[in-house]
Amino acid sequence: MYLDPIPNRNGTFTYLIRRSHRLGNNIVKTTLANVTKLGPDIMPDLQLLLRGGKVVTNIRDVFDVLSNKAHGHVAVVLGMMDQLGLPALIAPKNTRFRRLVLGMMAARVLQPASKLATSRLLDQESCSTTLNALLGLKRVDEDHLYEAMDMLAQQKSRIECALAQKHLGEGGLVLYDTTSSYVEGTQNEWAADGYHRDKKKGKQPIVIGLMTDGRGCPVSVEVFPGNTSDTATLGTQITKIQKTFGLQHVVLVGDRGILQQKQIQQEVLPVGLDWITGMRKNEIEGVLLAQNHPRSLFDETNLMEVEHQDFPHDRLILCRHPWQAQHHREKREALIAKTKEKLDVIVAATQREKRALKDQVVIGLRVGKVASQYKVNQYFLFDIREGFFSYQLNQTHLQKAEALDGLYAIRSSLKKEPQAPDLVRNYKRLATVEMAFRAMKSLSLPIRPIHHRKKARVEAHVLLCMLSYYVQYHLQQKLAPLLFAEEDLEPKRVDRHDLITPAKPTPQARKKATTKKNEQKRQVKSLEALMEELSGLNRLVVQPKIAIKEQKEVIMMDGQTPIQKEAFKLLNIQSL
């Protein structure tokens, strides 16, 4: 049987269900039914049925669902990695080592966890996402990941050189800062007792140095023993810049705890690098007091270039933050007031009629306890004698403190260019390194807990965290229209005129924060919330039940939400 459309004169059709058979040399057609009244829209389906098709009301009547995994966030992360060239960066050939490393990086962006939990996320038997299928990993356990980490540690220098070649250049800015983390257990080869920024009792720290380009894009990371001072890490970084990366002249930007006078004179200047750093409080005090009118220095501007005989070859820029100045003054006055209140109790105890406080040693102990509580004893002058105690404010120290309120200073070897505001702006770019540390030490890309013991595996673990931040950094840049973040931030940094007061959000960012929507009326979110929404896009692998020549698997997608479609469009990534 078949459907036979018969054209009419008025341009319509008459639809007949017919059957044909051969009678001798002729074809005889028999009309079984006239189905024109059913309407033309149903005719294609009716024709399909007459050819042997089936009517279904559920997809499972036609297909066997072989797999149904979360896919959207995986497609975004892996697509971003491909755009950044990370697969070729890890290894030139598509080896299992490369796929395992990419899987660990993606897993840390999507669902950071221990290597055991990560292996379960990547294994084909227990995976809840399409990471295993898209990377072709199949069977994965923690030993496979450890082996890949050991190989990654051997490739660390080559990977960092490739990133440096891509993001750094002669004469450009190189930002460098350090932080610390801590390890689990007592057998870690990097761990050692030292300055502990995290204040975690019972845990031994390690020191981590991070190098980025002028925008804050990570390029290199280094691990040091936990008892290494910040200044002691600088020499290896200079060697890495010049010997490993092959850059003979860059502008090294570091804070005052790293680029100190000794390091500048002995390590930076002899190799011909320029530098930008901050000045310590005692250095600022010496520069400020050398001026003729220190109080009126900032009456008209909060930024001023000065000279000082102790730094004849350096460029000095003094900056005054008005809000910080007021905050420091109010905090100091509040602490002094609390201290005076408790000191008055001691004075009263020495003057009471009955059982007066007489012992000079006891008086001194009580005064010392009060003075150390609020740490403002430098602003007091004490007179402690047998049976007598009095105090007064140290006006000299108070005047010095008031002069330094809200004050900081930039010091650099760059004598001619750039202009003073640009020099301050370049120093403030160190905040982007702090942002990277916060991402790597917070819930976003937690570097902890560190259970690894061997040096190579700790290095590989830290490198994986840095590379994951590298992916996240670029995701935030491209997905900014869907996030609360500022869009096109770098030009806005350059165009900012007032560099001293805190940066304020642009009208566009304030509007997004208020309305929770962007200019296209799309809902804006944090990156974590956006990735969670993308994870709701599933990828189905199905196989047809009907008999066909080749029983091939068919890949299908759930319906995409407008935000999911916009995210893929911004990243220029295909969802499948």
Image (spheres, grey):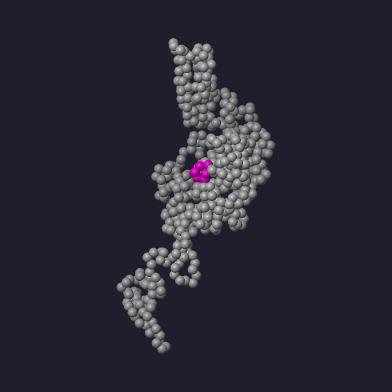
- Residue 257, image quadrant: top right
Residue at x 45%, y 67% (from the top left corner)? 544
Which quarter of the figure is the N terminus placed in? bottom left
Residue at x 66%, y 41% (from the top left corner)? 239
**Is 45 located above or below residue 435 in the figure?**
below
Report if residue 233 is visible in the image: yes
Q: Is residue 166 left or right of residue 509?
A: right
Magenta segment: does it hold 331?
Answer: no
On the image, the x and y values in percent for residue 456 come to 62, 46
Residue most extreme to the front: 186
On the image, the x and y values in percent for residue 380 come to 52, 19
Residue most extreme to the left: 37
| Main secondary-structure element of the magenta-colored stretch | loop
**Is 355 located above or below residue 320 in the figure?**
above
Residue at x 61%, y 37% (from the top left corner)? 192
**Is 352 located above or below residue 463 in the figure?**
above
- Residue 9, image quadrant: bottom left
